[in-house]
Image: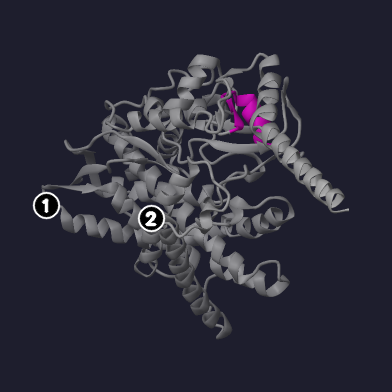
Amino acid sequence: MEDFIFKTIASSFALLVLYIVIRLVNNIWWRPRSTEKLLRQQGIRGSSYKLFNGDISDMKNSAIKALSKPISLNHKIAPRVTPFILKMVQQHGNVSFYWFGRRPRLIVVDAELTRLILTSKNGHFKKPPRNPLIKILTLGLSSLEGEAWTKRRRVVTSAFQLEKLKAMVPAFSISCHNMIERWEKLVKPNGSFELDVSVEFDVLAGDVIARTAFGSSYQEAKKIFELQKEQAILVNEALSSIYIPGFRFLPTKKNKRRYNLDFQIKAMLRDIIQKKEQVMREGQLKEHDLLSMLLQCRDQNNSLTTEDVIEECKLFYFAGQVTTSNTLAWTLIVLSMHPEWQEKARAEVLEIFGKKAPDFEGINHLKIVSMILYEVLRLYPPVTAIDKYNWCDTRVGNMSIPSGVEVHLPLLLLHYDGNYWEKPEEFNPLRFSEGVSKASKDHIAFYPFGWGPRICPGQNFAFLEAKLALSMILQHFSFMLSPSYAHAPSISITLKPQLGAPIVIRRT
């Protein structure tokens, strides 16, 4: 009897071990190799599968080498910003693949396929499974899927309706006016002054976000911005690493710092929320900013919790600041490189506004300024790539994408693709004189804010803020690159000047 029990236990244990081995072999060898075979049968080329790490080491080495020194003063930035993906496309074609660990990533540099993937309504393409440590930055709208995303999107989008944007212009103007005043104090009459505009625009964009979304000021929100910048650096590290299950619970130095940052940010946001709730209870709410709208939604239909509101605040504080700040920094850098366009933009601003503060109606008549911003967003998009995850076998165009494949859409490479843009590495705002589709040879190949149902809801907010800020700068100053400027575009979640943006300003 004991022998029988022992043999039964031994057999069960052997079967369990066999099952684990089969699952392991399937996950780390058979399934990846099978997926690779399916892709290659369609004529899609790419790197061969390597156990465990895939191409991660090559990706990191390429990035380290590319970022080790600045580049010459031109707009050929892809070799520095996305060297590994560029190499894969050059070697294997505009539709190719590489390996992030044991997961294949399908690179798609094709305007029509990109559009189909971003506008897909079958729900097959979703946010990729990611290292849980990335979620610490925000669990807001950008991280949601399905019905939860639909409900939250409706609330957030309502904050950026045309009439609400129009009502935000005075707040934009106050923030811009404060920056202009600060700059004027730095520049002596008939003199000049060097400043790092990337830092200046961080303050400006932060102040705008604080005023329009939370009814506060940059000084109140300054600590949140600083902590989120540090958190973003840690998240950027996690983005390029394979996650080992359970690692987030280990008390490593960086893990402890991640959770401490998150605790501090949430505590500060709770304080802002409590102050806003007090104002709402006392009936003293004068303007309906994003935070008050989120709180009203929470109280009216219980579709949001206080934690949800905090996550949306984290997202808007981060995304709302860095996108506009970086876009303005790149715009001043580019207009310093192309002073003839700086003069054309200044002439247009002075013709429409003179020295008066820009207003909403006049801003909508800024054609040259708009074309310049479009061209800067083409050359230096805030988000250089979008990743999707295919949950089941899906057909896109003539291509069959197996389940479990990530789709990598390198928007930067699409913005520089000669199939869609005339002389793509040249700065030429006139290409947008007849609209976006005409600029890209009647294709949709311009994706600075994404596309489809998940296009950035704050894009009009960012564009309006950028036009107003640039107009006021052009009214009061001319500018040129400092001799100390080093051209070093790099990705830290968004595309930014790695070594800052020192600009010499002079009063006009």
Image quadrant containing the C terminus: top left
Which residue is drawn at the image coordinates 44% and 21% (left, top)? 424
Q: Quadrant of residue 335?
A: top left
Give the CA distance from mark 2 to mark 1: 38 Å
Q: Quadrant of residue 80?
A: top left
What's the amino acid at mark 1?
Pro
Residue 196 in sight: yes
Query: Magenta segment range?
Result: 102-121
Vertical side of 469 occupied by 284: above or below: below
Residue 114 shown in magenta: yes
The residue carrying pointer 1 sits among few (fewer than 14), some (14 to 19) or many (20 or more) residues within 10 Å by Cα, namely few
Near-viewer residue (388 or 348): 388
Q: Position of residue 325 (x, y in %)?
A: 38, 49
Return the residue at label 1.
189
Question: Residue most toward the right?
Answer: 1
Secondary structure found at label 1: loop
Q: Position of residue 328 (x, y in %)?
A: 37, 45
Q: Position of residue 370 (x, y in %)?
A: 44, 39
Near-viewer residue (15 or 407): 15
Q: Which numbered disc, 2 or 1, marks the residue closer to the eye?
A: 2
Q: In the rendered view, does 431 fall on the left or right side of 154? A: left
Return the residue at label 2.
230
Residue 120 in sight: no
Secondary structure found at label 2: helix
Q: Of the residues under marks 2 and 1, which one precedes in the sequence? A: 1
Q: Position of residue 130 (x, y in %)?
A: 58, 45
Which residue is drawn at the image coordinates 22% and 42% (left, top)? 503
Which residue is drawn at the image coordinates 84% and 53% (left, top)? 2
